[in-house]
Amino acid sequence: MPRFFLDTPIPLSVTLELDARVAQHVRVLRLREGEAITLFNGTGGEVPATLTRIDKRVVEVTTGEHHNIECESATRITLYAALIANDRMDWMIQKATELGVDAIHPVYSERSQRIPGDVSKRAEHWRGVVIAACEQCGRNRLPVVHAPVALSDAFATTQGANNVLLDADGGARSGAANRTVNVFVGPEGGYSPNELTLLRAHCDTKLRIGRTVLRAETAAIAALAVLN
């Protein structure tokens, strides 16, 4: 059943007009009046609805009752990912969302990509990637995507969790018993020696995924799968 995110509270048992983004998506999918869809607003649960009007100007639905359906991971994982090329960063965020990540902190490191122009626009773009991934995968809670921070500032937000560094010199298993986990993954080319020293001092677990050297985005997704 098609799922759509609304960035507002969803009134129950009423007829309402969908916003322009969702209305356009309905038209692109060639849905018809009378078809069932699901609405969610990222705060938990979902609302079934029926398309009651579709024309060039307006798409309306009649909503049902709220269903408390959740598919969140038992392990709360925050991904601290050094910035990589835009298309690969988008892919990483999309797949991390599908795998149940709780939050994503993009990180500036010595070898990471730099964001040209307005950083807030890039963060809003990432939120759009998260929304689309949640619509596709069935999650009813949106992971939070934060604005990028410097690696040296990232540790201020990691208290109370097990910090896991994806490290080619680490162990083959995570050993992470804490159900709240922070995962640090480096950029293309890896962290610098000074950054590795800092990370190894702050991370409780050093984790190697497999025997080969993985791309940054592959390593992040593989680690999420292992830790889940």
Image: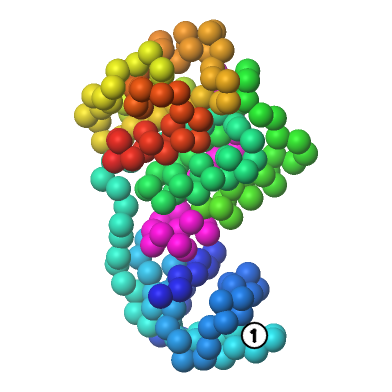
Residue 221 makes an appearance in the image: yes
As for residue 73 lying within the magenta part, the answer is no
* Vertical side of 95 occupied by 163: above or below: above
Tell me where the magenta segment starts and ends, as one range. 131-153
* Vertical side of 111 occupied by 227: above or below: below
Q: Residue at x 45, y 54 (%)?
A: 142
In the rendered image, residue 172, in percent from the top left (x then y), is placed at: 28, 22
- Looking at the rendered structure, the secondary structure element under dot 1 is loop
Residue 9 makes an appearance in the image: no
Check the picture and name the quadrant holding the N terminus: bottom left
Farthest residue, direction front: 212
Check the picture and name the quadrant holding the C terminus: top left
In the rendered image, residue 33, in percent from the top left (x then y), is placed at: 52, 91
**Colour scheme in the image?**
rainbow
Q: Quadrant of residue 113?
A: top right
In the rendered image, residue 62, in percent from the top left (x then y), is placed at: 46, 86
Q: Residue at x 30, y 35 (%)?
A: 227
Q: Quadrant of residue 83?
A: top right
Farthest residue, direction right: 117
Q: Please, what is the three-letter code of the amino acid marked with disc 1?
A: Val
Q: Which residue is mark 1?
A: 58
Q: Residue at x 54, y 17 (%)?
A: 191
Foreground: 34 or 178? 34
* Vertical side of 213 occupied by 8: above or below: below
In the rendered image, residue 60, in percent from the top left (x then y), is placed at: 56, 85
Foreground: 169 or 174? 169
Q: Is residue 209 left or right of residue 184?
A: left
